[in-house]
Image: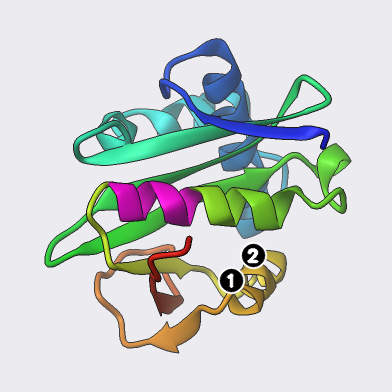
Amino acid sequence: MTWHFSPERVDSPAATALRRDYYAEVASRYWKRPATEAEIDEGLAGDGVELLTPPTGEFLVGTFKGEPAACGGVLLLDGGRAELTRVYIRPAFRGNGGAGLLMGGLEAAAHALGARRMVLNTRLDLIEARTLYVRHGYAEIPAYCEGPYMDIWYGKTLTQAV
């Protein structure tokens, strides 16, 4: 096994670098041009990531052969629901089996926090992410929130064996 996933503070050096890479990729794809460092700083400022720590959430960092390669978070909402957020694997590490392990780890973290259902929102242009979610049992649901970068919503009931 070359992947290892563990909870980490969102402001650790590895988590911060991964969050910056995540934002740079999704913003650049949305704007159809590379995001600037200033735009990344602005996008990450006040993004609520501090809630991704118990008891309100969890943030996982994945390493591949010891190198920070992936991240993702869960945020408790209400009524036993958690939101999946900031799911990211650096491009150089994709295709090495980390996505499924990350999803399993995030679902287990949500379940441990008391969630029985996971929901998420994403954009239509993030086809790889949408494919990942569907492959892991997520189905399209009605919108549970709204915002400028939300095109489609997914949900999944968590099982005891996550």
Q: Is residue 32 visible?
A: no
What's under tag 2, amino acid-wise?
A: Ala
Q: Secondary structure at mark 2?
A: helix
Left/right placement of residue 32 relative to residue 56 reads right
Q: Residue, x 87% and y 53% (percent of image)?
A: 95
Give the residue at mark 1: 133
Q: Residue furthest front?
A: 161
What's under tag 1, amino acid-wise?
A: Tyr
Taking depth in this image into account, of 88 and 2 the one nearest to the observer is 2
Q: Locate the N terminus and report the quarter of the image it occupies.
A: top right
Q: Secondary structure at mark 1?
A: helix
Q: Is residue 141 visible?
A: yes
Q: Is residue 131 above or below residue 15?
A: below
Say if mark 1 contacts mark 2, CB within 8 Å.
yes
Q: Residue furthest left?
A: 79
Whether the magenta-drawn stretch holds residue 108 is answered as yes
Give the residue at mark 2: 129
Q: Residue, x 34% and y 58% (percent of image)?
A: 83
Taking depth in this image into account, of 5 and 69 the one nearest to the observer is 5
Task: Give percent across and percent down for residue 154.
Answer: 43, 77
Whether the magenta-drawn stretch holds residue 4 is answered as no
Left/right placement of residue 22 relative to residue 79 reads right
Q: Is residue 145 above or below residue 51?
A: below
Q: Which residues are magenta?
A: 106-112
Task: Give percent across and percent down for residue 148.
Answer: 37, 64
Q: Residue, x 42% and y 24% (percent of image)?
A: 10
